[in-house]
Image: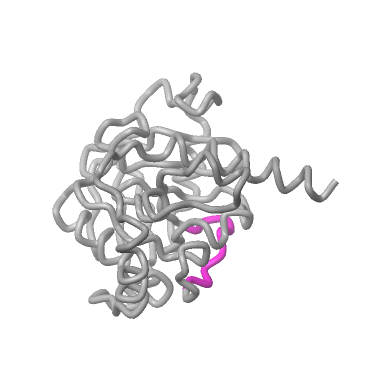
């Protein structure tokens, strides 16, 4: 029975990542990975521990994410860089799943796009052991590509583990089965009711095969560091 539950959890995670990011950037080879992992795991963030990002939605509602560079320094640096460049302004939350998460930050608006740079995956299954931020309600984490072989082998190559770029998700409920496989990097500290309101938008079937695609786009008017 425990084995069956594990398989179901892995399947859900794979559905999540397949709908997450379709970047085709050149992957880091296995030969590059050992050097990259060591260098990135020792990286210190240029962002202070109390930095916050405010999202203003098209309807004027707002929510705030507090960033945690002590757990995921490169992930936080990349997120702040994109926010500061105005990358997220005008983009949408394209995937809303009841009891799971709200996902956004894709310039294509359908889960297939991202920013130009893919970043190192700061989570345990990628050899990075310092990320202790669990995927509980309100936690913000990075979406990435998922290896279809992992459900059978338990192993993902760096092509998949180091594939996050701009897409992120906010947990509606505890999703601790994602711990160790995704780079959690922040927490919604204000306006979680705004994120909850995304669930009120009518949805149709998305690329993930679920009723997850908003019929009316949920648009980010502006994201800014505060």
Is residue 215 shown in magenta?
A: no
**Who is closer to the viewer here, 155 or 73?**
155
Which region is colored magenta?
Answer: 131-139
Residue depicted at 29% across the width and 79% down the height = 44
**Position of 112 relative to 83 (above/below):** above
Position of 169 compared to 150: left or right? Answer: left
The image quarter containing residue 80 is bottom left
Residue depicted at 44% across the width and 56% down the height = 141
**Who is closer to the viewer here, 147 or 193?**
147
Position of 93 compared to 80: left or right? Answer: right
Residue depicted at 47% across the width and 41% down the height = 17
Residue depicted at 56% across the width and 48% down the height = 172
**Who is closer to the viewer here, 160 or 166?**
160
The image quarter containing residue 47 is bottom left
Position of 201 compared to 48: left or right? Answer: right
* x and y percentages locating residue 57 in the rendered image: 31, 42
Quadrant the C terminus occupies: bottom left
* x and y percentages locating residue 55 in the rendered image: 31, 51
Is residue 133 shown in magenta?
A: yes
The image quarter containing residue 88 is top left
């Amino acid at each position: 029975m425990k084995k069956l539950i594990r398989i179901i959890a892995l399947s859900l995670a794979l559905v999540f990542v397949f709908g997450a990011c379709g970047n085709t950037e050149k992957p880091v080879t296995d030969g590059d990975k050992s050097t990259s992992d060591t260098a990135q795991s020792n990286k210190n963030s240029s962002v202070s521990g109390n930095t916050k990002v405010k999202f203003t939605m098209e309807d004027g509602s707002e929510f705030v994410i507090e960033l945690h560079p002590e757990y995921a320094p490169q992930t936080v640096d990349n997120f702040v860089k994109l926010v500061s460049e105005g990358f997220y302004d005008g983009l949408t939350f394209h995937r809303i799943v009841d009891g799971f998460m709200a996902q956004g930050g894709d310039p294509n608006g359908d889960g297939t796009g991202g920013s130009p740079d893919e970043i190192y995956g700061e989570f345990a299954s990628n050899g990075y052991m310092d990320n202790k931020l669990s995927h509980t309600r309100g936690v913000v984490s990075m979406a990435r590509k998922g290896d279809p072989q992992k459900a059978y082998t338990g192993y993902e190559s760096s092509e998949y583990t180091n594939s996050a770029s701009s897409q992120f998700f906010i947990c509606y409920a505890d999703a601790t089965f994602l711990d160790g496989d995704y780079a959690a990097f922040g927490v919604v500290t204000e306006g979680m009711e705004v994120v909850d309101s995304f669930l009120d938008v009518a949805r149709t079937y998305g690329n993930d095969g679920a009723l997850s695609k908003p019929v009316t786009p949920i648009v980010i008017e502006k994201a800014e560091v505060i």
